[in-house]
Image (cartoon, grey):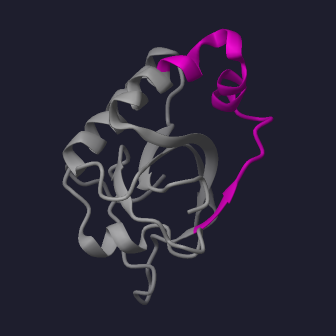
């Protein structure tokens, strides 16, 4: 991805509220993400940060193949890490931003149940597990959600 990088910092209230703008009807709040690209308001003229859609076509991704292989133990390992925060769901998706796509591990947590600090630590730990298994360029996003679509 060719976007600008920034040091780890909590998302602004605006980013928390609008990160999933145009993706989910209820626009769930972002808690934390392992990626470091600079978020821009999606309604800002000339914005390059605009999540346009999620795709679930998994056939051409080593990450998705490992995810779907129960014998790999990846899901169990990630679930054990996430159970410390009482997650509500864990799913994989290909996130498309302005025509560029990347694989993402998405974790949901109950609203107002997880601080950015703990969420960021979880996102980095999950990303590290993926990298230990040779899966690079996959990020982890944590959002407030009681179920997958909310």
Q: Residue 3's x, y, as percent?
A: 40, 59
Q: Residue 131's x, y, as percent?
A: 45, 22
Query: In the rendered view, would you say 144 is above or below 129?
Result: below
Q: Nearer the viewer, residue 12 or 77?
A: 77
**Residue 64 falls left or right of residue 126:** right
Furthest residue to the top? 71
The residue depicted at 34 percent of the width and 28 percent of the height is 125
The residue depicted at 37 percent of the width and 72 percent of the height is 17
Query: In the rendered view, would you say 134 is above or below 87?
Result: above
Report which quarter residue 4 is drawn in.
bottom left
The residue depicted at 60 percent of the width and 53 percent of the height is 148
Report which quarter residue 61 is drawn in.
top right
Is 60 colored magenta in this rendering? Answer: yes
Query: In the rendered view, would you say 22 is above or below 121?
Result: below
Q: Residue 116's x, y, as percent?
A: 24, 50
**Residue 122 falls left or right of residue 133:** left
Number of callouts: 0
Quadrant showing the C terminus:
bottom right
**Residue 11 falls left or right of residue 127:** left
The boundaries of the magenta stretch are 52-77
Report which quarter residue 89 is drawn in.
top right
Q: Nearer the viewer, residue 49 or 146?
A: 146
The residue depicted at 40 percent of the width and 64 percent of the height is 29
């Amino acid at each position: 991805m060719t976007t600008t990088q920034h040091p780890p910092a909590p998302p602004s209230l605006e980013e928390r509220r609008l990160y999933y703008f145009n993706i989910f009807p209820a626009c769930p709040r972002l808690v934390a993400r392992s990626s470091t690209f600079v978020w821009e308001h999606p309604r800002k003229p000339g914005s390059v940060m605009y999540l346009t859609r999620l795709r679930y076509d998994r056939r051409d991704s080593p990450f998705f193949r490992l995810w779907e292989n129960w014998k790999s133990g990846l899901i169990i390992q990630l679930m054990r890490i996430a159970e410390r925060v009482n997650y509500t769901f864990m799913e994989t998706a290909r996130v498309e931003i302005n025509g560029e796509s990347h694989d993402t591990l998405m974790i949901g947590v109950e609203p107002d149940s997880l601080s950015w600090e703990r969420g960021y630590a979880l996102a980095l730990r999950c990303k590290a597990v993926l990298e230990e298994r040779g899966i690079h360029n996959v990020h982890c996003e944590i959002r407030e959600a009681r179920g997958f679509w909310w």
